[in-house]
Amino acid sequence: MLEPGVLVGDVIVSGNEAKPEVVVLNQKLILFSNVMNQQSATSSCPLSMVLTEFHTLVMYVDRIKVYCLLNGEIVFEEVFPEAYGRMIGLAKDPVTGSIWAFSEMAVYRYKVTNQKWQSIGTRSRKKTGMCGRFTKEDRNVWEVYLEQGNYEAAKYYCKGDPQKLDRVFKKHADDLFEKKEYVSSAEMYAETCTSFEEVSLRFLQMAEESEDDDKEEALRRLLVRKLAKLRPAEKTQTTMIVMWLVELFLNRLGTLRTAERQHQDVYKSLVREFHALLSDPKVEQCVAHNKSVVYKLIASHGEENILIDFANIMKDLSSLRATEKRTSSSILLTL
């Protein structure tokens, strides 16, 4: 504890016991705030302090303040009754984790656990009473990490709370989008409860503004992730997304086909990805009920080889024979 505040950091001890070397990394100064502007320097001077995992408890003559070690903010403050006299100090039991605050006439006990710290009770010469103060030690830690952009730590301290996790995923997705990491952003948006239509429109507008492989791939990834999350009963939205994906794949394949020499490997990779999509049970069931639409889409893009492969996947022998008659030979992609 220094005059302006509490200096915290990671203490690294190296060397042997006879000659240890101590280094303090990631130092941070948690500044004290005045109890009251009108108070004298003596009354506003901290008397004692103890540390917990995420907080420092600082004792003044008439109150205790709890500062968050992550951002320096005051998260809890308790004023002690004058009837018990001036506060004297703080002490922490290293075994039980209990923190004891003692005044001229009373002792206050604070219990620190993995989940919360709490004021358990007051014992004095006059009476014994229960304060009943409860504050979770890590209840706002996830939000502090979120504001700092430490998303992995924020997710961990959400403790599985779906509403908190949704906020973390949403902000992470927004940040990735601003950094132009579109594919990662799309995958993160797919984990949120954000309106699918809103996010899809955002990526669609972005892809239309400029031809960028990453932007198109981001939109495809978003649709594939969303499709995987749809329930069997959501047939209309499933059909819409499947048809949209088919159109996106065909558009991209057509672009690559016109410059096949330069993008032959990319073309074959995308064909494999398209085949994997069509072979997915949910997609296969959907296109089985909309075969004519899919055939027309593929034919309109002039993808005869894809048309043959699609007929093979669907085990549609009549369409396969008809397609083979329109071509000089069967074009089968070797994967």
Image (spheres, grey):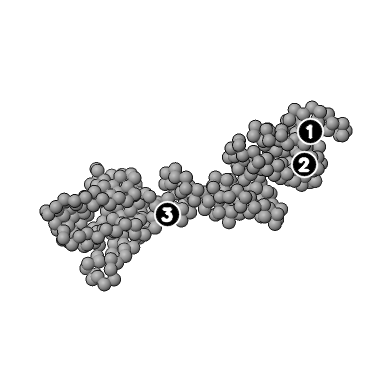
Q: Which mark is residue 308?
A: 1
Which corner quadrant holds the N terminus? bottom left
Whichever of callouts 3 and 1 sits on the residue coming sooner in the sequence is: 3
| 246 left or right, relative to 197 | right
Q: Residue at x 39, y 55 (%)?
A: 70
* Secondary structure of residue under mark 1: helix
Of the pair 122 and 188, the residue shown nearer to us: 122
Query: In which quadrant of the rendered view does residue 286 lie?
Result: top right
Which corner quadrant holds the C terminus? top right
Depth-wise, is mark 2 or mark 3 nearer the camera? 2
The image position of residue 80, as x and y in percent, is 22, 59
The image position of residue 223, as x and y in percent, is 64, 44
- In this view, the residue farthest toward the left is 125
- Report the amino acid beneath label 3: Val
**Gap between marks 2 and 3, in whole Å?**
49 Å
- Report the amino acid beneath label 2: Leu
Q: Which mark is residue 297?
A: 2
* Secondary structure of residue under mark 2: helix
Q: Is residue 107 visible?
A: yes
* Secondary structure of residue under mark 3: helix
Residue where numbered disc 3 is placed? 144
**Gap between marks 3 and 1, in whole Å?**
55 Å
Of the pair 216 and 119, the residue shown nearer to us: 119
- What is the crowding at mark 1: few (fewer than 14 residues within 10 Å), some, or many (at least 20)? many
- What is the crowding at mark 2: few (fewer than 14 residues within 10 Å), some, or many (at least 20)? some
**Gap between marks 1 and 2, in whole Å?**
13 Å
Q: Residue at x 83, y 29 (%)?
A: 321
